[in-house]
Structures are given as C-alpha cells and as structure tokens.
Amino acid sequence: MTKLLTKLRNSHDGWISTYLFTDVGRYFEEIDYVINYAVYKYLRSSGWVFQRSSLGRLPKKYRNIGQGVFESGECLSKKQRASSGIPLSSDIYKLRLREEKEEQKSKSNKNKKAAAQG
C-alpha cells in the first residue's frame, strides 16, 4: 500500500509541477476527488473496512454514472485524505510556486552580485 501511495503522490506532484504556470487550479477539486476515490477503492479492495459515517462523498458532477465508475459516491473524507500522505492539489501548487519564487529571487541576487563585481 505504501508503494501505491508514494507513486500516486509523486505522480500528482509531478503533474502539478509540470503545469504550474497554466490555469491548472481549475482542475484541483476534480483531481482531489478522483484521488480520494481511487485510494478509497484500493483500500476497500484490500480488505479495509470503513465506517460509512467517516467517508466523504463525491459530488454528482464528478460521478461518471454512465459507466458506473463512481456509482456509490463514497470516497475518502478530507480527514482521511490528510492522513494518506497525499497532499491536496492546492497545497502542492502553493509549495511549488513558493519554491519557484525563491529560486528566481536567488538567481536575481546572484546576477546583482556578479554585475556589482564585474
């Protein structure tokens, strides 16, 4: 299970990092619900027992009823997701933007020092 969660976390982070400077934020809610459902489905098929009262619900707009994929609407709750080790899309996005700004600031400072010395 740890392998799946790590792989999913890395893929999720990589996707957001790749599309950091696009309008990726409009997909965050849907991505997070799909991840919540995928982890729930995997854990359930692995024998984990969930109390219905602790589960989250997929909004109807993210259920693909025609194919029966998300019929039950059950998924991980926000609290369960926080414990999964897979950060929310918006959290990854904020972290990557902060890192990018720090990197640009560092490069700018190096260029200023080089120009002052040269």
Image (cartoon, grey):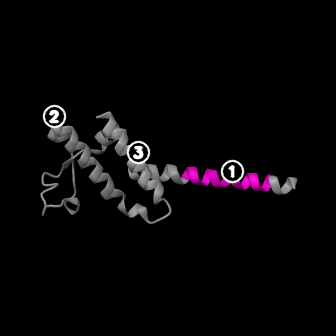
Residue at 78 percent of width and 56 percent of height: 112
Which x, y percent locates residue 78? Answer: 30, 45
Circles 3 and 2: CB atoms closer than 8 Å:
no
Dot 2 corresponds to which residue?
A: 49
Position of the C terminus, as image quadrant, is: bottom right
Residue at 39 percent of width and 52 percent of height: 89
The residues bearing labels 3 and 2 have C-alpha atoms spaced at a distance of 26 Å
Circles 1 and 2: CB atoms closer than 8 Å:
no
The residue furthest right is 118
Mark 3 surroundings: few (<14), some (14-19) or many (≥20) residues within 10 A: few
Which x, y percent locates residue 9? Answer: 38, 44
Q: Amino acid at mark 3?
A: Asn
Work out whether residue 106 or residue 10 is closer to the camera in this orientation and state it.
10
The residues bearing labels 3 and 1 have C-alpha atoms spaced at a distance of 26 Å
* Residue 75 circle label: none
Main secondary structure along the magenta-highlighted residues: helix
Which x, y percent locates residue 100? Answer: 58, 53
Q: Is residue 101 magenta?
A: yes
Mark 1: which secondary structure?
A: helix
Position of residue 67 relative to residue 51, above or below, is: below
Between discs 1 and 2, the one toward the N terminus: 2
Q: Which residues are magenta?
A: 98-113
Of circles 3 and 2, the one toward us is 3
Work out whether residue 37 or residue 114 is closer to the camera in this orientation and state it.
114
Mark 1 surroundings: few (<14), some (14-19) or many (≥20) residues within 10 A: few
